[in-house]
Amino acid sequence: MEGFWEKYQTFLGTAAEKLKEVINAPPFRGLRINPEKISQEDLYRRYGYLETVPWCPEGYYLSEDMFLGKDPWHWAGAFYLQEPSAMLPVEVLDPKPGDKVLDLAAAPGGKSTQILSKLKGEGILVANEVNSSRAKVLTENLERWGYENFLVLNESPPNLEEKFEAYFDRILVDAPCSGEGMFRKNPKAIDEWSIEHVLGCSVRQKKLLTTAAKLLKEGGVMVYSTCTFNPEENERVVAWFLKQNPNFALESIEIKGVSPGVPEWAESNLELQKTFRIWPFQQKGEGHFAARMVKLCDDGKKSHLPKKGKPKRKKINMEEFSKFWQEYFTVPEPEVAFKGEKLLLLPQNLPDITGLKVVCAGRELGEIKKGRFVPSQALAFSLLSKKFTRALELPGELLQAFIKGESFSVPWSEGWYLICDEGVALGFGYVKKGVFKNRLAKNLRSFAF
Ligand code: SAM
């Protein structure tokens, strides 16, 4: 932390003392609900009253004794555990149903799940993550959230330029940063802090923004955000970007309860007042910065409308799948694609992604095993599962047995059952000769509590 307090003394003046006072306090923690799976009423019924986050209508503060990491509602995508200030950037991006949205640095996926909620199943989210193991976690988190309209890519951002030039309506650049807003949550971030690291981050951030600018269509909106306080990585990066790209302008949008950015930290460019900040001594949040920029239209340029084309979809006559669907679902059978024995539901209007590293394109619905269709865990997490006719709530002990992965005797008729916890679908099981055979994914069974 050499040089940290000296720097903040210069930037903040007397307010540096306030930052010093709060830096050792316990961090704020929060959750954001998935409104397609639970409501505020459901949340309060299960956990009691929780204070709402001013800048995010779906966000709530956790109390100090609440630890919900193992709660079935968490791993089944009824809410996402997220530090409250991290809920800011997507509110600033404000995606609308039907938009094509890119989350350029997306893992582990907090902001991507928030984007999916805003899209309400219409349009598409391309969630990209350069680190392959983080891209897998990102996929799991997006699958849990329940929507089908997303793709997960594992690319270095410049590799997206060829396929996606001027393609997106909205782009989030939630950049890797020096993480000063993580100091209370993750003391390791303090050890990694140095002025050289901060400057290194700002170089990387400028590169990311330059790539993102090429991928945004004219009239499109881009949000740049970090979870650090440092002006070098915030106001100064944005001021630099605007100088390099005169076809971009900052835009204001009403967000409740946050502070503005500070123009004096970047050559007094007054436009920077339109950016947003959360400080741990001013708001109830660990700290975040967000800037909303619009790409202005330039009539001299070629039309950037995406090429229209029929999405590649295959109609497969899958008798067993059809039988299953007709027996258990109240909605028409979807068109599916086939990958080996697995059946996939592809997102609508899939862009051309040939040649890119695709981690996930389409939700796995299940597979044909020994001539029969077996539904997947991803189907249980899908919002489609709300239309499953044999959904069951189990009494406490049996629910625990289900989460532990146990099989048990039941007096129920033969067939598939979807097990739910207070309305939230957890997983499938199959009953044969009075025995319930558990089909909850093995990696979730360790979550028993
Ligand atoms: N948006 C995420 C969320 O809300 O869950 C958090 C993103 S985190 C702040 C930044 C991400 O950028 C990390 O997942 C990291 O792996 C990725 N990253 C690191 N270096 C990168 C680079 N040079 N280009 C693109 N992404 C990078």
Image (tube, helix red, strand yellow):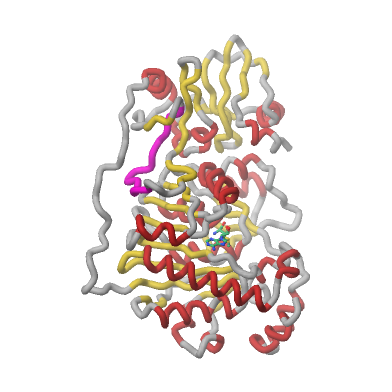
**Residue at (70% x, 27% y) in the render:** 401
Residue closest to the far top: 433
Locate residue 311, reporting x and y percent.
30, 42
Ligand 1 is in which quadrant of the figure? bottom right
Residue 343 lies in the magenta stretch:
yes
The range drawn in magenta is 342-353
Front-most of residues 9 and 380? 9
Above or below, 376 relative to 206: above
Q: In which quarter of the image is residue 301?
A: bottom left
Front-most of residues 228 and 131? 131
Quarter of the figure with the C terminus: top right
Quarter of the figure with the N terminus: bottom right
Residue 239 lies in the magenta stretch:
no
Above or below, 173 relative to 291: above
Above or below, 199 relative to 225: below
Locate residue 268, reporting x and y percent.
50, 90
Whether residue 40 is visible, yes or no, is: no
**Residue at (70% x, 72% y) in the render:** 193
Indicate left or right for 224 with 100 as reference: right
Locate residue 308, reporting x and y percent.
24, 50
**Residue at (54% x, 28% y) in the render:** 418
